Image: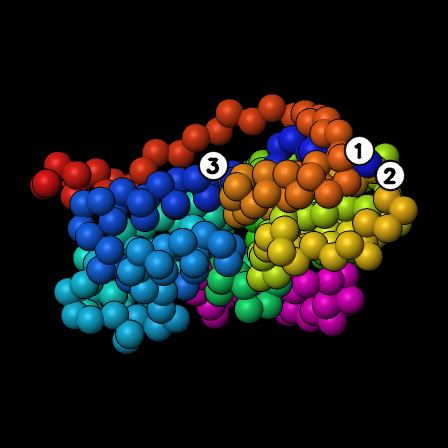
Amino acid sequence: MKVLLANPRGFCAGVNMAIACLDEAIKICGPNIYVYHEIVHNKYVVERFSKQGVKFVDTIGEVPMGAYLLYSAHGVSPQVRQEARDRQLRTIDATCPLVTKVHLEAVRFARQGYTIVLIGHHGHDEVIGTMGEAPERIVLVETPEDVAQLSFPAETRLAYLTQTTLSVSEAQRVISSLKVRFPEIVGPPKEDICYATTNRQEAVGVLAPQADVVIVLGSQNSSNSQRLKEIAREIGKPAYLIDTVKELQRDWLRDARTVLITAGASAPEVVVQECVDFLRGEYGAEVEEITIREEDVHFQLPRELKVLQLQT
């Protein structure tokens, strides 16, 4: 067996920042910290922090008055921030700057009188947070079929934004449908889909045709990981999304001479290497790492954390 190890893969700058933020917060404040939703959409990462005593909550009401609360990489709505202030919580904002960019674009378009068509997946944490910036002015669509159902008064000024973790081709199909249906619609100055999502999808698109099967490390609720699996399947390759090597099924590898391994932007490298080690040990796999694009993006820790560091 030959293993093609896709690069780039795994943690993006936003995920690295969020995890480093929570690690540092634990050092400063102790493990009695609350996180609104999952810090990132990855079971392995969440379980690691849970074992340290971090508590993940779905509502602000679950957090004791005055406690430390960290916002996840996916961002939150202004309503959530207000609820936290009402409970006098000491908040640390680990929102990915690229998600914050979309929030700011939503605010800007809304203030300029636009109705915003947000392209994204219903119920995703990032989408909920973005829509919360201007709920009365944002309409969510997922597919070109959704676009066909849209109806606005003739004088409506329209703009579109996208969730940062969409399939590039999927988003482009929806954007094209919007532009055909509403020729005057405007978009952001720079596309919203993040560099890491785009790069990981590009790597799968280039390498999957060389493989017999594709293994994506990542969690089922990870949007960008799901997109990697879908892209491989669109190319015609069997593709599977797993959290750890324990979920890898031997039937998937029957007659597979070449296996492509990649990882979503919230999946840690340790689970990738466990999978590689398993294939080496069980199948005598030879591993070739192939770099499609270099990444050198880094985000600074949030200001609130730096203030805490100075206070200790």
How would you rate the neighbour count of disc 3 (Cα within 10 Å): few for under 14, some for 14-19, many for 20 or more? many
Is 220 contained in the magenta span? no
- Distance between the Cα atoms at labels 1 and 2? 6 Å
**If the image is split into quadrants, where does the N terminus sit?**
top right
Q: Residue at x 43, y 57 (%)?
A: 46
Label 3 sits on residue: 13
Label 1 sits on residue: 2
- Which of marks 3 and 2 precedes in the sequence? 3
Identify which amino acid the numbered label 1 is placed on. Answer: Lys
Q: Would residue 289 be seen by someone viewing this image from the given angle?
A: yes
- Which of marks 2 and 1 precedes in the sequence? 1
| Nearer to the camera, 233 or 185 | 233
Identify which amino acid the numbered label 3 is placed on. Answer: Ala
Does the CB distance between marks 2 and 3 fall below 8 Å? Answer: no
- Distance between the Cα atoms at labels 1 and 3? 29 Å
Identify which amino acid the numbered label 2 is placed on. Answer: Arg
Answer left or right for 198 relative to 249.
left
- Which of marks 3 and 1 precedes in the sequence? 1
Q: Which residues are magenta?
A: 129-155
Answer left or right for 196 relative to 31.
right
How would you rate the neighbour count of disc 1 (Cα within 10 Å): few for under 14, some for 14-19, many for 20 or more? some
Label 2 sits on residue: 257
Mark 1: which secondary structure? strand
Q: Would residue 36 be seen by someone viewing this image from the given angle?
A: no
Q: Nearer the viewer, mark 1 or mark 3?
A: 1
In the rendered image, residue 168, in percent from the top left (x then y), is placed at 70, 45
Mark 2: which secondary structure? loop
| Nearer to the camera, 108 or 230 | 230
